[in-house]
Image (cartoon, grey):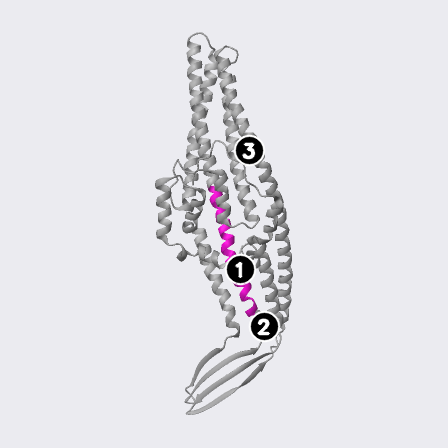
Amino acid sequence: MMKIISPSLLVLSLLSTQAWAQAADPSAAPETTRAAVTDRTRADAPMALDEAYELALDYDAEYKLAEAEFDVNKTAAKQSMAAYLPSASYSMTNIPTDGLTRQVFSVNQPIVSLERLAVLRQRGPRRRYADTYLLFRQNELAQRVLKSVADYVRANESAKLNAAKVRALSEQSVRATRLYKGGLGTVTDARELEVRYQQAKAAQILLESERGAVAARLRSLTGVDISDKDFILPDRVPRIALLPKEELEPGVQTNPSVIAAGLSERVAKLDAQRAKWGLLPTVNGSASYTLASGRSISFVGITVSAPINAGGIFSAQASSASARRSSEERRRIQEQAKVGFQRLYGLVSGGDAALQSSALAIEAAEQSVVANQKSYDGGVRSNLDVVNAIQTAFEVKSQYVNSAMSLAENYLDLQLTAGVSAAEAIASVQKFMFRGQR
């Protein structure tokens, strides 16, 4: 979403303070400092979510492109100042047939030009737009980092859970085979356990491949290799310290997408004004010096010009239509942000409560496995009952991991929608999701 040239892109990107721009400027974060963070992370502790975000700020190719775009937009904003600056020109004409050489020096200073005034007034919105563009891309980067981390956690935890299931099924398979050979079990139980065991082993190969692929994707964002000690999900995720809806909701009007929409509308209206005022006469101060055949002519005075161009009328009408479209787009973005906030708040508050219930389900599933194993040893349950209990425990734990990471993503989106900065939002997710890894 962006580029002042395109209103549709403009809507997805705007605002930030000068401090934000400096924080994102590569010159403000020397490579040696970032390298030190990397060395400390790899050597001393598991990588934290906020550290991954910091590394991505300095490495991710897509974000580095956004920084370059930021410089372009800043320069475009500065160009608006030139609207009322004087201009100078020099020309030389040589006519061989007449043996005449004419040199003309001229200087022009706009005095009254409403069209140029409209261009000059775009400087502030364009400058703020450049800042917001970078802020928007930081939010986008935070979402991509968390999405990659969430995918890695899902793949890593699934591989570990499946490995535990493989071990449990292996033990049950050995037990079933021993009982069958001792005349105390059935061949059906032994064969059923062998099938389940081999299926779990095959799944483990695929899960480990998926974990490697996701780790490679995360490396493409951060520039560092991911190890087994990174992003370990705790056995039980703590409750989120969610602020009341009334405290968060006012921030919706300060998130980059909403501010971007407002600035986009402002620029579009000024552009429509520029096109309309371009049909009016302009007054310039002019000075010229002409040298030809050893004679010179000087002129200093006022120049009045009145454009007569039918195409300008249609251009003004098109710009007015674009301004109206930009206003409707701003209103649409604002409504989307309000509805999105309500939806995300419900998902986070409900998902937080549901996650705590899922943790209790894990405890019950683990107890069920133990109870079925004891009942099987006592001859009350079959081997298949034990296997089903093991499979249920695996599914419950996998669901818990998926729910936890979905909650983390929704929590980040909620904060960003409520106008919280990307760095602060990432740090909040780190606190509740990977507490103790920082």
Of marks 3 and 2, the one in the foreground? 3
Kind of residue indicated by mark 2: Glu
Identify which residue is drawn at 45% across, 84% down. 104
Report the disc number at residue 129.
1
Task: Tell how many labels.
Answer: 3
Q: Is residue 57 visible?
A: yes
Q: From the viewer's perspective, is residue 128 above or below residue 46?
A: below
* Magenta range: 119-148
> Principal SS element in the magenta part?
helix
Residue 139: within the magenta? Answer: yes
Say which residue label 2 marks: 115
Q: Residue at x 45, y 61 (%)?
A: 71
Amino acid at pointer 1 = Tyr
Residue 341, position in %: x, y?
60, 46
Give me the residue at 41% from left, 46% from top.
222
Q: Are marks 2 and 1 in contact (CB under 8 Å)?
A: no
Residue identifier under label 3? 355
Quarter-of-image position of residue 261: bottom right
